Amino acid sequence: MDAVLRAGAIYIALMVLFRISGRRALGEMTSFDFVLLLIIGEATQQALLGDDFSVTNAILVIVTLLTIDIGFSLVKRRSKRIGKLIDGGPTIVVENGAFLKHRMHEARVEEDDIMQAARLGQGLESVDQIKFAIIERNGKISIISR
């Protein structure tokens, strides 16, 4: 029972932490982000298993995490409001060639990130060429040119 409670608590804690860190934290990963994710994974493994490294405990933790994940997906399917609370929604950060600084700050995205997405995805060189830049739920930046 202890493993189930630990798994549930860790799952919720990680969801909250990643939600607070912003969607861009999971969008494009730098080498620093990757190393940080590995460290978080190791710390999470230790917290989940505690002192019991048995196969039975590992299976119990995995089943608990999958059950919680399936439960959340069912709840999100039934309620768009809860789905938006858990996953967030798309955020417009450029509108008609103008950076929306307050939204960029909330999404933890910089002008350079947006312009990189514009260059790579659309071949655009100036913010004036962007009708909309949108931070999607998965952290990727979508660009709609003028």
Image (cartoon, grey):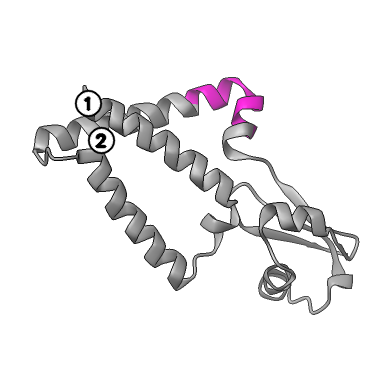
Q: Secondary structure at mark 2?
A: helix
Q: Is residue 70 above or below residue 44?
A: above
- Viewer-nearest residue: 114 or 44: 44
Residue that numbered label 2 is attached to: 62
At a point 37% along the width and 32% down the height, the residue shown is 9
- Viewer-nearest residue: 136 or 4: 4
What amino acid is at disc 1? Answer: Asp
Please state the horizontal and vertical placement of residue 98, each as a whole percent of the image.
89, 64
In the displayed structure, does residue 121 sit left or right of residue 31?
A: right
- State yes or no: residue 46 in magenta: no
- Point out the image quarter for the C terminus: bottom right
At a point 78% along the width and 75% down the height, the residue shown is 124
At a point 25% along the width and 35% down the height, the residue shown is 62
Foreground mark, 1 or 2, reads 1
What amino acid is at disc 2? Answer: Ile
Residue that numbered label 1 is attached to: 2
